[in-house]
Image (cartoon, grey):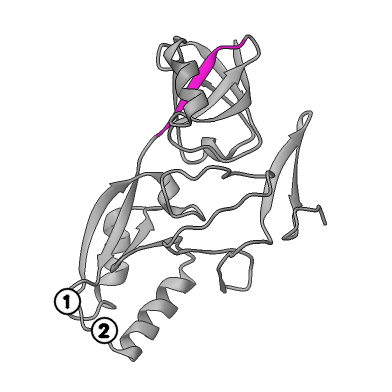
Amino acid sequence: MLVADGYLGHHDDPAIVDRLADANAHRVVLSDTDRRRSRVRTETDDGRDLGVVVARDLCDGDVLETEEGDLVVVELAPVEALVLDFTDADVGAIAALTLGHTLGNRHWDLAIRGSRALFPVADTYERMETIVADLLPDGVTVRSETVSPTTFDETGADHAHGHGRGDGDHPHGDEGYVHTHGDDGHVHTHEDGGHTYGHSHGDLSHVHPHSADGDET
């Protein structure tokens, strides 16, 4: 079995471009769940048994290295999103508060793209569409769209260098990212610190909260 335990960078990094040009790289497609796990057993696109042991979230085009020096290029399986388009809508304060309060209590992840709000489909698109149907102000349109799972990452982009868990570098773009967690039902936004990431020791998984300066607490 191939074991990819080294993270090299993104395939458009100059140093990585040169290495890929001289290599017959393996390719692997990961789900949104698997790309966040520190240990994954899967297959390459040509059927090779592959273990991925990297303690960071992975993005489209990330390049890993196996113990033998082989390169593995990561691709991400797309996810379905419910899209609310406010481009032609005239939304009053009460309607906005009602919509935000109701959807916030649903604990749906959210990404903002200009005048569009995107929510990953966790159940079925039809059920989510039914939930929002009676809440939408006039002019708001609803549709389904296939997007990269990184749409709902903290960077709000398909790729950001230095992304992931435990490297102390968490870049943020112009697009918003919101998620909910805990039992209090509140919506939490992340800025520069307070991240939590998971990694494993042997066969046991641990989660360590990190402060803004990267020290374990």
- The kind of residue tagged 2 is Val
- Residues shaded magenta: 69-76
Q: Earlier in the sequence, mark 2 or mark 1?
A: 2
User: Does dot 1 land on a helix, a strand or a loop?
Assistant: loop
Q: Which residue is pictured at 35% across the width and 40% down the height? A: 78
Q: Residues within 10 Å of mark 1 (few under 14, many from 20)?
A: few
User: Does dot 2 land on a helix, a strand or a loop?
Assistant: loop
Residue at the disc numbered 1: 139
| Disc assigned to residue 186 | none
Are dots 2 and 1 in contact, CB under 8 Å? yes
Q: Position of residue 86 (x, y in %)?
A: 24, 72
Q: Is residue 27 left or right of residue 211?
A: left
Residue 64 showing in the rendered view? yes
Q: Main secondary structure of the magenta part?
A: strand
Residue at the disc numbered 2: 91
Q: Position of residue 105 (x, y in %)?
A: 48, 73
